[in-house]
């Protein structure tokens, strides 16, 4: 006879998956509002646009520096312990940030330090969380599970941005930062209940450097993996510069200000939700080939801003881009899940994260000088062209074109004897 829990949720949405999704939604709601709040907190303290950038960079730099170490640690220690510790660090740093802002005593160095601590927490949390999520499902329903997870995340991102904006207007940035600290506390409590009995004990010895080398061998030995990470290292850099620097400037000069640009970004977010919904049903066999084809539209927003097109057309472009990029996102998670051994998931995820964010700060810093030398329109066309070129190059990698979806793990991808959520006798070893 089915239990109450099994009647309320699908078979693939087991305990770990449900806890991970619920806690991720909570932190996403808080964090995306807090990103806006931190910028307004700097401005409220008398800072300018340059100081807003310094506080943002103070979070990104530790994230880049500690990601690989975070991945090795997450594969060495119980992942849920790493996740909870990172959440506690984020909770304390955001609570201190909120207290300073509410007291009206926040100074630039303090905000940079606390943002940096948040980046350290994210560096350790991200690889552990991705490894835990990838090991929480198995079999042919994995793609659907990842699609639902990403749909929940994209929806909470939209909700967090909207809610954060309303709260800042009504109560000020300090209370939004305090709410983010509370969200991390709730998420840490949820993640403390994750079940890690399905993860085989790690062999003693080797050391951190040996773990990093082992992760590098796993990463560099798979052409489909490192080629796509290089692709997104470049694509994320130029798209990030276009969205963060050129987009607001085009909106100011040609589209009517911040509101139309915000609307376009909202359409992109809506597209990601729809894309994830599509992937709950669609299971392309050549998942990386289909996913990579869906990266080409990532060039469209930069091209649309270069023209520039009317607001309605820009919104349509952003929506289509959101849908297509989410198809890639679900396909990518499915490929990692089926191809990477469980005990190396966090290290491989760390190399993936590192490649994805390493060039973004430099690209944003260079966006202004590049515009001064070549012009904004030319810079935007360059962003679009680079996305097309690196995506076409990835399609030349045979494994990207031929890797097929499987319903069972590949040989050698040891994931333990059962999934994290398999039914087991109470008190038994499974």
Image (tube, grey):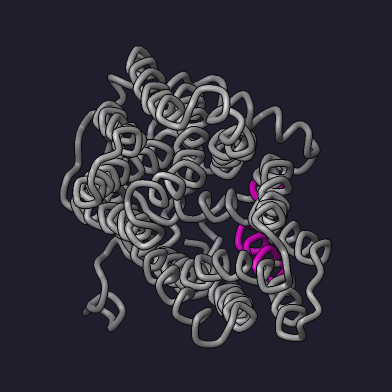
Q: Is residue 339 left or right of residue 233?
A: left
Q: Is residue 12 magenta?
A: no
Taking the spot 46% from the left edge, 27% from the top edge, the residue there is 379
Residue 145's quadrant in the figure?
bottom left
Q: Is residue 201 left or right of residue 332?
A: right
Q: Is residue 79 magenta?
A: yes
Residue 317's quadrant in the figure?
top left
Magenta segment boundaries in residue numbering? 73-89
Our reading of the magenta stretch's main secondary structure is helix
Residue 335 visible in the shown view: yes
Along the viewing direction, whichever of 190 and 98 lies nearer the viewer:
98
Q: Is residue 105 left or right of residue 216?
A: right
Along the viewing direction, whichever of 267 and 226 lies nearer the viewer:
267
Residue 65's quadrant in the figure?
top right
Figure check: 3 above or below 14: below
Q: Position of residue 162 (x, y in %)?
A: 40, 72
């Amino acid at each position: 006879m089915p239990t109450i829990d099994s009647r309320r949720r699908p078979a693939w949405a087991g305990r770990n998956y449900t806890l991970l999704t619920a806690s991720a939604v909570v932190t996403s709601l808080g964090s995306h509002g807090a990103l806006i709040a931190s910028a307004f907190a700097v401005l409220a303290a008398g800072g300018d646009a340059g100081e807003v950038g310094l506080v943002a960079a103070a979070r990104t730099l530790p994230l880049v520096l500690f990601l690989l170490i975070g991945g090795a640690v997450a594969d060495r220690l119980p992942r849920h312990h790493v996740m909870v510790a990172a959440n506690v660090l984020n909770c304390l740093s955001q609570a201190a940030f909120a207290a300073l802002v509410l007291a009206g005593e926040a100074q630039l160095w303090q905000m940079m330090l606390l943002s940096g601590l948040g980046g350290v927490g994210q560096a350790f949390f991200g690889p552990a969380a991705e490894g835990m999520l990838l090991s929480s499902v198995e079999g042919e329903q994995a793609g659907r599970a990842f699609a639902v997870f990403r749909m929940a995340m994209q929806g909470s991102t939209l909700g967090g941005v909207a809610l954060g904006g309303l709260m800042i207007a009504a109560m000020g940035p300090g209370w939004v930062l305090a709410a983010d600290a509370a969200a991390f506390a709730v998420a840490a409590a949820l993640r403390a209940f994750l079940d890690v009995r399905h993860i085989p004990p790690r062999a003693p010895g080797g050391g951190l450097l040996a773990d990093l080398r082992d992760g590098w061998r796993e990463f560099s030995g798979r052409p489909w993996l490192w080629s796509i990470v290089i692709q997104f290292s470049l694509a994320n850099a130029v798209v990030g510069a276009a969205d963060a620097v050129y987009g607001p400037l085009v909106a100011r000069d040609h589209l009517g200000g911040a509101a139309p640009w915000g609307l376009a970004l909202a359409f992109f977010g809506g597209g990601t939700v729809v894309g994830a919904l599509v992937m709950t049903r669609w299971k392309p066999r050549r998942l990386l080939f289909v996913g990579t084809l869906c990266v080409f539209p990532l060039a469209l927003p930069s091209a649309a801003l270069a023209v520039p097109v009317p607001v309605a057309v820009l919104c349509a472009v952003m929506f289509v881009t959101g849908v297509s990029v989410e198809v890639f996102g679900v396909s990518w998670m499915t490929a990692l899940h089926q191809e990477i051994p469980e005990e190396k998931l966090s290290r491989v995820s760390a190399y993936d994260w590192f490649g994805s964010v390493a060039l973004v700060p430099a690209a944003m810093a260079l966006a202004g000088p590049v515009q001064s030398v070549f012009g904004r329109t030319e810079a935007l066309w360059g962003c679009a062209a680079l996305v097309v070129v690196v995506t076409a190059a990835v399609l030349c990698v045979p494994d990207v074109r031929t890797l097929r979806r499987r319903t069972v793990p590949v040989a050698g991808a040891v994931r333990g004897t059962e999934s994290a959520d398999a039914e087991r006798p109470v008190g038994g070893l499974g």
